[in-house]
Image (cartoon, helix red, strand yellow):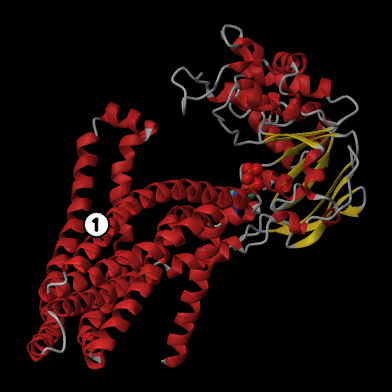
Amino acid sequence: MVKKLWTQIGSIGNNVWFGLKISFLASRKYFFLKCLILLSTTLLPLTTIWLWKEILNRVIGGDVQTVICYLVCYLLLTLVTYLLAKVNQYISNRYNDELLFYIDGVMIEKVSRMDLSFFDSASMGDKVRQTRSNFGEMMNITWMIFGILSDCINVLAALIIVTTYRWWIGLATVLLLIPYMRYNKKYSERRYQLAKQQQRDQRRMNYYNGVFFDTNIQFEMKLNHTGSYFIQKYHEAWLKLYRINKREDIRYNSINAGLSILNILSELLVMAISVVDVYAGHIGVGDLQYNLSMVSRLREQIRALMAGINDFMMENTMLNEMQEFVSMKPEYEKSGSRIPSANPRVEFEHVSFRYPGTEQYVLKDCSFTIEPHEKVGLIGLNGAGKTTIVKLLFRFYDPESGCIKLDGVDLKEYDIYAVRGIFGVLFQDYVRYSLPLREIIALSDFEQRYNEEKLRAVCDLTGVSDIIKDWEDGFDSVLGRNYVDNGKDLSGGQWQLVSLARAYFKDCDYMILDEPSAALDPVSEDRIFEQLYRLSEGKSAVTISHRLSNTTLADRLLILGDGHIIEQGPHEELLKQNGEYARLFRLQASKYMG
Ligand code: ADP
């Protein structure tokens, strides 16, 4: 029990430290200003209550001069308190801006350096999404910590003042609060559990709500007239959550009201003692008022402190996750330092691999070699593992066993970014960036984005020039409508051509095109492959496809099946062998020929 409590305190302390560190790093200036204001806003009300006590005592004692003097001080303090509240508001807003920017920056920077495998498994994907929203919450946590610090100072000050009057009144106030605090702690645990249980319902409700903002679903919704169905689903999900929350609130507020009566006892106690003391002439009327204010202040501040700590504890798990995320090792830490040649021999030696968190091996004892300047077609059915081979080559993942070599040297000895730098790549899942076309194409070699000649050349080559010939702003036209109203829309095939232009834009001796024709019409498809083989004279090229008609021009074909290379050789030779490739080829040919 003690050990558990100790661990909990340790973890909270650690997280407070983490939160403070982030708050401090976000803006040293505003951090200090905020601390300063915190201290002043804590001490000013206490001084004001004390002054009020003195004024009351002096009024009754008839000391007019001092009363006037104190009244002036009181007015000045009120003015300062008011001004400080305004300054606090301004500083909090600026600090908010800086915190948000800093926290976003930390998150983005970290994610940009994480291994791809980090995003793979569903749990990790959830973790990234979770951490993202956690980082958004981080700002609240900063305010929470400042709130707790402020409450601590307030409780301490009120406790000292009350116990100085009668030590046991301070003690009684704290003891009378225990049932209230215990109930509230139990209740917040219950709320936490409930919130966890409700997550699924909450997600369901958000899903039903989200469908109205998804353009793809909107299209179908209008077509099939399913809007009212989703509205009803949304309403049902909302009602379920609403009813539970209503029941909980009624229960909480009634028990809390009962417990609050207990808390008022400490005020009755101090009132009775103070009245006796006033009659006995030990204290003035001002002291009576002062004692009352202090006891009620002590009680309220302890409540606020406990509520703050409770809230913070609820965020503790989230902070643990964030700390775990921040301390994750970025990918460059697994990089070697060797620089690869522009056109290396690529060897896979007995490579086996399965994706993190999955049972099924995608590659099993897979071995093959691609010689420099060779044009190879990598062929296999959907899901055979072709893209996985490319991902392993770029060290997005490492093999579970076996070895990948460049020019006979283990890939792990190479600088990870230099390796990626030698390849011009088109991935199967092309990205629809919302940027000016010039930048979208030049992302692979950004320094060259204003090289009009080079841009024109790749656009002519890939057929992008035909798409943009009527665009007024040419290369400066923005694609997508995420943030501009007149952004250009492209079809899937056109996007693929733009991605291809990007792959070509990078001057490199090694092209890898993963399903370059998946979304293309037959004319573009033909042109792409013809250009590819013509342009990669003296270069290496790997084309990945499950469509065999285009790969016949390759020097050599590697047929991937059952996790390894089952056949390899030039097209004609493989046809003669009459194995798997020949079977697939004839199957596809018969579809075209009828
Ligand atoms: P191909 O390119 O031959 O169509 P892939 O290499 O993309 O196939 O995928 C091979 C297998 O690995 C498929 O069964 C696919 O579902 C699985 N796979 C691909 N990516 C992941 C991933 N990130 N996590 C888990 N499984 C994956």
Viewer-closest of 589 and 5: 5
Dividing the image into 4 quarters, which one contains the C terminus? top right
Residue positioned 52% across, 74% down in the render: 14
The residue shown at (15%, 85%) is: 270
Neighbour tally class for label 1: few under 14, some 14-19, many 20 plus, Cα within 10 Å: few
- Please state the horizontal and vertical placement of residue 54, each as a whole percent of the image: 21, 73
Q: Nearer the viewer, residue 172 or 363?
A: 172
Q: Is 292 above or below relative to 582?
A: below
Q: Would you place residue 278 above or below residue 553 in this image?
A: below
Image location of residue 28, percent across then percent down? 56, 55
Q: Is residue 210 left or right of residue 507?
A: left
User: At 83% from the left edge and 48% from the top edge, which residue is drawn?
Assistant: 368
Which quadrant would the N terminus be assigned to in this image? bottom left
Q: Residue at x 38, y 69 (%)?
A: 148
Q: Picture coordinates of residue 208 (x, y %)? A: 29, 44
Tell me: 102 left or right of 413: left
Q: How many numbered circles does the render carry? A: 1
| Residue type highlighted by circle 1 | Leu
The quadrant holding residue 318 is bottom left
Q: Do we see residue 420 in this rendering?
A: yes
Nearest to the observer: residue 301 or residue 383 = 301
Q: Is mark 1 within 8 Å of ligand 1?
A: no
Asked whether residue 594 appears in the rendered view, the answer is no
Seen in the image, is 491 located left or right of residue 392? left
What residue sits right under mark 1 in the picture?
75
* Helix, strand or loop at mark 1: helix
Percent of width and height locating residue 580: 72, 42
> Based on the displayed image, in which of its 4 quarters is residue 360 positioned?
bottom right
Image quadrant where residue 559 sits? top right
Left or right? Give the position of 405 relative to 401: right
